[in-house]
Image: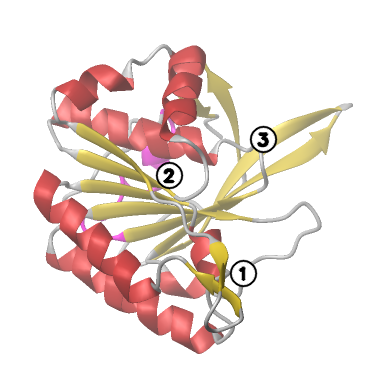
Amino acid sequence: MERVPTGIKGFDDMVEGGLVPSSVTIIGGHPGTGKTLFCSQFLYTGAAKYKEPGVYITLEQRAEDIKYDVKDTLGWDLEELEKKKMLTFWPLRIKRVFHPLEKKKVLTMSMPELSKKVIEMIDSTKAKRLVIDSVSIIDMMFEDKFQIRSELVALFDGFKDRGVTSLLTAEIPEKGERSEFIDFVGDMVIKLDTMYVRDEFRRIMTVTKMRRSEHSHFIHPYKITKNGIEVTKL
């Protein structure tokens, strides 16, 4: 089967050479585990090495902060790829504001509106790789968990129909709770975490689910280096 390389040293070996084309991957983890860098490396690899346009939709962080962090940590100038129209960063903020007529707080954007904007962005940029950071914000838009699953499945179908391989981050709070939909809506689930070993915290990665492919079932240590994320070979 053809694969979509992430460019993350050691990771592609865990999943038979890379991600399944047109698949949706959920990356869950605590703050500081490297979810944003993982996604940035995935888009950078596609744009710089394979000439595949990518879109980074950020629902929380400022786009400028992401680009600065990547340049400071890895030395990659993502703005140069933006100028070449190989990367597009799109901050899309969803807020709760008070509606004077309804006398309550309402969202500034509905899920159908969000889905429409994302698909339009994919079409206008001809993107082949997509990041949404993070879907935890979307999770907060719904009280009905069945509704959010059905809405996301419809959106993901739009990605797949266009041949887009996507990564979506999901925040896992320190106390261990997580959104109920993380394990169900994606074709693949990657968990990033930390483990206390010999008086220090070490980052660990596990692939807990991957459709249409074999994958490693081991816990893999990884590091964030000047060359990007590197997974330790077991």
Q: Is residue 187 left or right of residue 108?
A: left
Q: Is residue 105 left or right of residue 85?
A: right
User: Residue 231 versus residue 168: which sits nearer the camera?
Assistant: 168
Disc assigned to residue 14: 2
In magenta, the rendered stretch is: 9-23
Amino acid carrying mark 1 in the image = Ser
User: Residue 66 versus residue 41: which sits nearer the camera?
Assistant: 66
Relative image position of residue 119 (x, y in whole percent): 20, 61
Does the rendering let one see residue 118?
A: yes
Q: Which residue is most to the right?
A: 199
Relative image position of residue 41 (x, y in whole percent): 38, 31
Q: What residue is disc 1 on?
A: 179
Q: Earlier in the sequence, mark 2 or mark 3?
A: 2
Question: Is label 3 in a helix, a strand or a loop?
Answer: strand
Q: CA distance from mark 2 to mark 1?
A: 25 Å
Residue 56, located in which quarter of the rendered image?
top left
Amino acid carrying mark 3 in the image = Arg
